[in-house]
Image: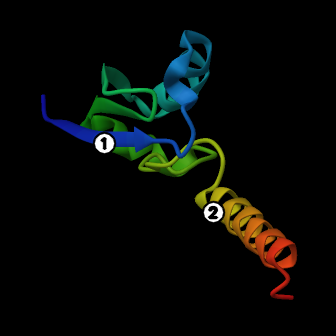
Amino acid sequence: MELEYKVVQSTTPLFATSKKIEEIMAEESKAGWQLVEKFDNYKMRLQRDISHRANDKNLGFDAYRSQVGVNNIIVYGITTLLTLAVVYAIFVLVGAV
């Protein structure tokens, strides 16, 4: 039996509750992945036997995905807009604009 591993991560603390872990693992288990360890609320290590690769093309998702939850672009985009709004507000308050 040959095993392969992957680390699944989230930008937000998605793995903080057992319910969310169970939801994610329900989908990952369709590709044969099993939970090995939870590093923290942001990362988990999974493993599966390489024989499960044969079924990957029949899944409705990427069996090798490593990111779950909110997309990084959305998180970084919102953070950028909020930062720009705060900087603009500071400039208005000090009379620079």
Residue sitting at 44 percent across and 35 percent down?
A: 42
Report the number of numbered marks: 2
CB atoms of marks 1 and 2 within 8 Å: no
Image quadrant assignment for residue 88: bottom right
- Crowd around label 2: few <14 · some 14–19 · many ≥20 (10 Å): few
> From the viewer's perspective, is residue 41 above or below residue 94?
above
> Residue 91, which numbered label?
none
Residue sitting at 31 percent across and 32 percent down?
A: 45
Farthest-out residue, front: 94
Residue sitting at 47 percent across and 50 percent down?
A: 65
Residue, disc 1: 6
Farthest-out residue, top: 18
Residue, disc 2: 76
Give the CA separation, mark 1 to mark 2. 24 Å
Q: Position of residue 5 (x, y in %)?
A: 25, 39
What kind of residue is marked 1? Lys
Residue 25 visible at all: no
Farthest-out residue, bottom: 97
Q: Position of residue 44 (x, y in %)?
A: 37, 31
Image quadrant assignment for residue 80: bottom right
Colour scheme of this structure image? rainbow
- The disc, 1 or 2, on the residue closer to the chain's N-terminal end is 1
In the rendered structure, the answer to whether residue 50 lies left or right of residue 80 reads: left
- Crowd around label 1: few <14 · some 14–19 · many ≥20 (10 Å): some
